[in-house]
Amino acid sequence: MQSGSSSLAHERLQRHPVAFATIGVIHTLLTAGIVFGWASLLPVLRDDGMDLPPSAFARIFTHGAIGNYLSSLPLGLVLDKFGPKTCGILSSTLVAIGLVLCARGTNGSPTCLDTGFALLGFAGPGVQLPTLHIARLFDGDKAALYMSAQAGAFDGGRWCCSRYY
């Protein structure tokens, strides 16, 4: 039954590659590079009453960035061992938990903010990794265009944070 289900999913991907590519790029834009929009969030956090010294804000960003850089290997192993669906679900779940912790952290708990932002940084690449295989649905230049769109969406994640201020 597993191979039939997999075959149906693959046929669906082949019939609508542009739709799935668009969803993949939007998913990456909204979640994968969000940790790099930290500078845009600082004024919002201060306006909301987060009265922390600059060194604490710098530490929170550092933990998010380190999580982002270190997560590619373990999440790549999850991708190789369990497949893109499991990697995507795991990473999206970690992003959701990170967002909840960040929201609780703005209510006075810098530890929640720190842990949540580290989770956002860690899970971000795991959101993007499963979508990279979609490039195989396209030929030549279209595959390169999709990969470029993915890279742009990852870097464009900082735009999401700037919309809040």
Image (tube, helix red, strand yellow):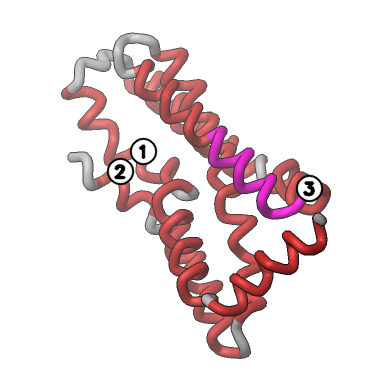
- Residue extending farthest bottom: 140
Seen as rendered, the residue at the extreme top is 108
Direction from residue 13 to residue 152 in the image, left or right? left
- Label 1 crowding class (10 Å Cα cut-off): few <14, some 14-19, many 20+? some
Please provide percent x and percent y for residue 13.
Answer: 60, 71
Q: Which image quadrant for residue 9?
A: bottom right
Which callout, 1 or 2, points at the residue further toward the start of the chain?
1
| Residue at image mark 2 | 161
Q: Mark 2 or mark 3, which is nearer to you?
A: 3
Give above or below for 148 relative to 24.
below
Judged from the image, the secondary structure of the residue bearing numbered disc 3 is: helix
Q: Give the distance between the C-alpha atoms of the residues marked 1 and 3, in whole angstroms.
A: 32 Å
Q: CA distance from mark 2 to mark 3?
A: 31 Å
Nearest the eye: 90 or 28: 90
Label 1 element class: helix
Task: Give the residue pinned by disc 1.
Answer: 38
Considering only vertical position in the picture, is 30 above or below 63? below
Three-letter amino acid code at the position of disc 3: Phe
Give me the C-alpha separation between circle 1 and circle 2: 7 Å
User: In this figure, which residue is indicated by the disc labeled 3?
Assistant: 82
Q: Which residues are magenta?
A: 82-94
Mark sitting earlier along the chain (2/3)? 3
Residue 144 covered by magenta stretch: no
User: Residue 105: image x %, image y %?
Assistant: 37, 17
Between circles 1 and 3, the one closer to the viewer is 3
Report helix, strand or loop for mark 2: helix
Residue 88 in magenta?
yes
